[in-house]
Amino acid sequence: MVKNHVKKFVTIDDRLDLGVIASLIDDDTWVLDLGCGSGALLEYLIKTKDVKGMGIDINIEKTILCMKKGIPVVYQDLNEGLTNFKEDTFDYCVLSQTLQVVQHPDELILDMLRIAKYGIVSFPNFGYYRLPLKLFFRGRMPVSKEFPYDWDNTPNIHLVTIKDFREFCKKNGILILKEYHNYGENYSSGHFLNNKRSKNCVMMITLERKSGK
Amino acid sequence: MESAQNSVGLVKTEYFTFAEEEEDHLVLDSGKNFGPVTVAYETYGTLNPERDNAILVCHALSGDAHAAGFHADNDRKPGWWEDMIGPGKAFDTNMYFVICSNVLGGCVGTTGPSSINPRTGKPYGMEFPVVTIGDMVKVQKKLVDRLGIEKLLAVTGGSMGGMQALEWSLRFPNSVRSAIIIASTACLSAQSIAFDAVGRNAITSDPNWQGGDYYGGEIPARGLSIARMIGHITYLSDRSMHEKFGRKLQSSGKFNFDFSSEFQVESYLDYQGTKFVERFDANSYLYVTKAMDYFDVAGYYGEGVLEKALDLVKARIIILSFTSDWLFPPYQSEEMLDAFVQAGKDVSYVNIDSPYGHDAFLLEYELETKLIGTFLYATYNNEMFWEEKW
């Protein structure tokens, strides 16, 4: 029944979510990757999709690794916002596995959708059913592959579930164009109970007013 | 000679003269024709057979062509950017061919107000035409052409040197593969122009200045040294001054209750002023600061719109600024960054956390080496698969 939704994605830098994100990006477009790390996604996109790519990161060593690949990069703290970029500068603005560590995720997402036509966000789903079970049975903050930190050293300050995110989008005039959920070794869309069953998700979003609706 | 193993070693300043005939004269931005022009320059490393490994280093207000190495075995100090130029350094002379020349209007070998006007047999003084950063770059282009280089791998510099790097990428977009713009700006702020104006006032109100016609007599040493003191204040930061001098007194622990230079910061400024007078010409200070004040990329190339001006650029760009620089503050670099992004250009930017103020560009060489070394390496060695796009 759901077989037609299943598609094989490449892994980029050992990450499947980056493969999903890459699949959502059209050729010959302009992509800004927020929290780009050493630039693995951008390198892949530049080489295979002929995009113009630019990254932002707060880690100077990773910034230098981007430069080494020849990828334009800005050393900047996302918590200071993206006010420096003008409206509709980029086609896509990517925020992968970074949403949960920024101070104002709401402002950041709206800013992403201001400077780009599309936002693509990937985040670990705190609604995954095993996490509350762990909390319930062990009485301690759950630790998993997606949430590998203890409570006292975690950079994750805004844990979110897929449902929360959908709710947030609804409230802020944001359209979810595509949703992919991670089950086991792959990502797919349209699964039943995806808020409980998926560990990770990728969402492609845009502003309702920009979508022409 | 210190640390000679990482140095380019003994170097010699060379000279190149052009625009000797009237028809070859340089057309200045002011509309005036000017010639002849002699350029003082130095080179380090070797130009490869493909001639694609050349880097032009542009100096700041008080710099000169002597950017690296030593002129004599007993030289106490190397060139002004020794930390960055040499074997294994950011501008690695094992890989690259580095050129540095003294600017037009300067006083260390290149034609300027203290040079002899061939028509009168006397120094130009105020007869020297007012020049711009663009004019300085035109002269550098002649030199680069003369050296047989069609396209520079990079043009770089800090402060006024950064302005020249930016100007290169606009005036000769097809001759530059990358520009490395450090502690610089696309135009001076009112505050920076104000400091320059005070410096110029100090010089022109020195009775020895004599309308610029002081050569052969007493020089306006007091005026030039005050100009330099003001400059030095703007090159440091509140924090670096506090750390370096605090309120410490020069000799005794007690106040003298007079107006001698008691505080350490006072005698530091005195020293910087005096030292500067020995090596710099007061008229050059007027001309070069004026060129900086006139620099306005948006005005010259973009009808007041920076983004429009920067659209002309074809080079890859990296911009570096320093958090404590209040002469050319980071926000000016960020304005450049944003305009480059809006123009859809290949631009990178790092605001380096440093307490050293504007002078940081000469001091933070460790991180600068990593950033610039990597950026250059990528520009020189990568496939440049995106080059067509930008």
Image: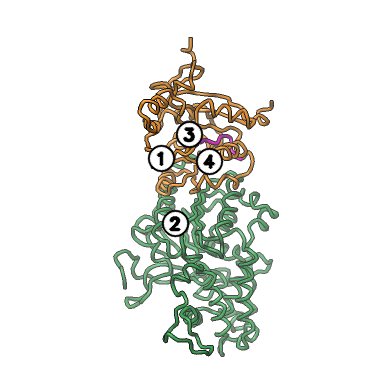
Chain colours: A orange, B green
Quarter-wise, where is residue B344 in the image? top right
Q: Point out the stretch of residues depicted in magenta.
A: A89-99
**What residue type is disc 1 on?**
Thr
Of the pair B272 and B13, the residue shown nearer to us: B272
Quarter-wise, where is residue B209 in the image? bottom right
Q: Whole-Å distance between the Cαs marked 4 and 2?
A: 21 Å
Q: Are marks 2 and 3 in contact (CB under 8 Å)?
A: no
Q: Whole-Å distance between the Cαs marked 2 and 1?
A: 48 Å
Q: Whole-Å distance between the Cαs marked 3 and 4?
A: 41 Å
Q: Whole-Å distance between the Cαs marked 2 and 3?
A: 51 Å
Protein chain holding label 1: A
Which callout, 4 or 1, points to the residue nearer the camera? 1
Earlier in the chain: of badge 3 and badge 1, it is 1
* Residue at the disc numbered 3: A159
Q: Are marks 3 and 1 in contact (CB under 8 Å)?
A: no
Of the pair B120 and A54, the residue shown nearer to us: A54
Q: Which mark is residue B378?
A: none
* Secondary structure found at label 4: loop
**What residue type is disc 4 on?**
Glu
Bin the neighbour count of mark 2 within 10 Å (Cα to Cα): few under 14, some 14-19, many 20 and up: many
**What residue type is disc 2 on?**
Ala
Give me the residue at 40% from left, 71% from top: B12
Protein chain holding label 3: A
* Residue at the disc numbered 1: A154
Q: Are marks 3 and 1 on the same chain?
A: yes
* Secondary structure found at label 2: strand
Bin the neighbour count of mark 1 within 10 Å (Cα to Cα): few under 14, some 14-19, many 20 and up: few
In magenta segment, residue A96: yes
* Secondary structure found at label 1: loop
Decide: is A68 above or below A178: below
Q: Position of residue A63 (x, y in %)?
A: 44, 47
